[in-house]
Every structure is written in C-alpha cells, then in structure tokens.
Image: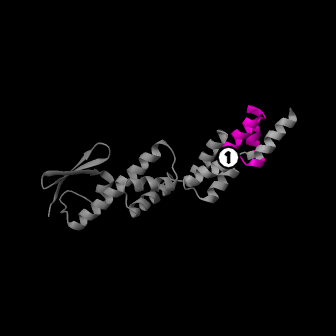
Amino acid sequence: MPTITALRSERRGRVAVELDGSAWRTLPADAVVRAGLSVGRTLERADLRLLRREVRRAETLATASRALRTRDHSRQQLVERLARADVAPATREESLEVLTRAGFVDDARVAASRARALAERSYGDEAIRLDLERKGIARELIEEALSELAGEVERANLVVARRGASPQTARYLAGRGFAVDTVESAVAAESAEE
C-alpha cells in the first residue's frame, strides 16, 4: 500500500500529494482535509474511494460557484449546468444543498430580481411569468415576485405615455407579454386624455 510522504500547499487552494517519495496528484485542499489525508498515512482502497468522492464534490462546488460568480441562477439552472458537466445526481444535490444553506442559491431572490429587471424593461406579467418558469422557479415564488412589482396596468400606462397611444404601441405591449385587457385599457385611457 502506498504511503503519503508529503503534502505541499500549492496556489489556489490546492495541495500537492506525494506518495512513497514521488509526486502523485495535486488536489483541492478541502478534499484533502475532508478525506483525512496526512503524512505517514497509508492509502487503502476505501481511502481512495473517499478521496475520489471528496474531489468530485469539491469540483462540483467549484463549477457551481463559477456559474454564480457573475449572476444569480435558479436551483434548476444549476442542476442543468451540473448535469451537462456530467456530475452525478447525488453529488449535484449535495453540492446544491451546501450552496443553498450558505445562501448562494435562493430561488426567491432570483425570482424577485429577475422580475424587477424585466418589469423595468417594459415586460408584462405573462412574459415575466414565462421567463421565470423557464428558469425552473416554483409557481408560488413567481406569483410572490409579481406581487412585489408595480401593477401591470401602471407599467403599461407608463409605456403608453412614453410611446403614445397608437396601434404600434398596442402591438409592442402585446409582444412584451401584457394582458390584452391591460393593453386595451392603457391605450384607451391615453387616447381619451388626448
């Protein structure tokens, strides 16, 4: 059985592992710690299985963290991304639970911020709802996010005030996911004022 003869800290949270006096692997530091590797320890088959599992876990967390570095993602988006990276379902779930407990994965936050961003870009409730459903957000979180926005009629009135009450504006609003009755009332209200 091979024996660990050295553990050397490398940059970026990695550890170089030496077995029987020869370089073996460079592994994520947290995987080395969680697997309990230490100088003088003999690596048996069970130890290697544990180490392999911990390395996969560390790599999965790193993949998910890289995705979250630039913007929020829903849990479902991360599941899909990790599935494309060929991460085993059990490892995916474990890693997502860790990220959720740490507050990095929060579907309610994703729903609220995405709904706000789309509303600011003149999208109606139906378009926002569809976008959030595509991201795998639960229906109750979608409805909660929509309830926090200014009313759809109010948002439609702002668009009509900016663009004018015309058939083109009505088509624009309809294409942006506003309800038909909202479009009609917003355009009619602006036309009546003129």
Q: Which residues are magenta?
A: 153-181
SS for dot 1:
loop
Q: Nearer the viewer, residue 76 or 64?
A: 76
**Residue at left 67%, top 43%?**
175
**Residue at left 73%, top 36%?**
169
Q: Say if residue 95 shows up in the picture.
A: yes
- The quarter in which the N terminus is drawn is bottom left
Q: Main secondary structure of the magenta part?
A: helix
**Residue at left 43%, top 52%?**
81
Q: Nearer the viewer, residue 106 or 155?
A: 155
Q: Say if residue 35 shows up in the picture.
A: no
Instruction: Tell which residue pokes out farthest to the left in this image.
Output: 21
Residue 6 within the magenta-colored segment of the rendering:
no
Instruction: Tell which residue pokes out farthest to the front in this image.
Output: 167
Horizontal side of residue 26 vs 64, given as left or right: left
**Residue at left 46%, top 60%?**
97
Q: Position of residue 164 (x, y in %)?
A: 77, 32
* Residue on which the image places disc 1: 177
- The quarter in which the C terminus is drawn is top right
**Is 22 drawn above or below residue 175 in the view shown?**
below
Q: Position of residue 42 (x, y in %)?
A: 18, 63
Q: Quadrant of residue 141?
A: bottom right
Residue 170 within the magenta-colored segment of the rendering:
yes
Q: Amino acid at mark 1?
A: Gly
Horizontal side of residue 154 vs 66, given as left or right: right
Q: Position of residue 168 (x, y in %)?
A: 72, 35
Horizontal side of residue 107 vs 147, given as left or right: left
Horizontal side of residue 168 vs 127, given as left or right: right
**Is 45 drawn above or below residue 194 in the view shown?**
below
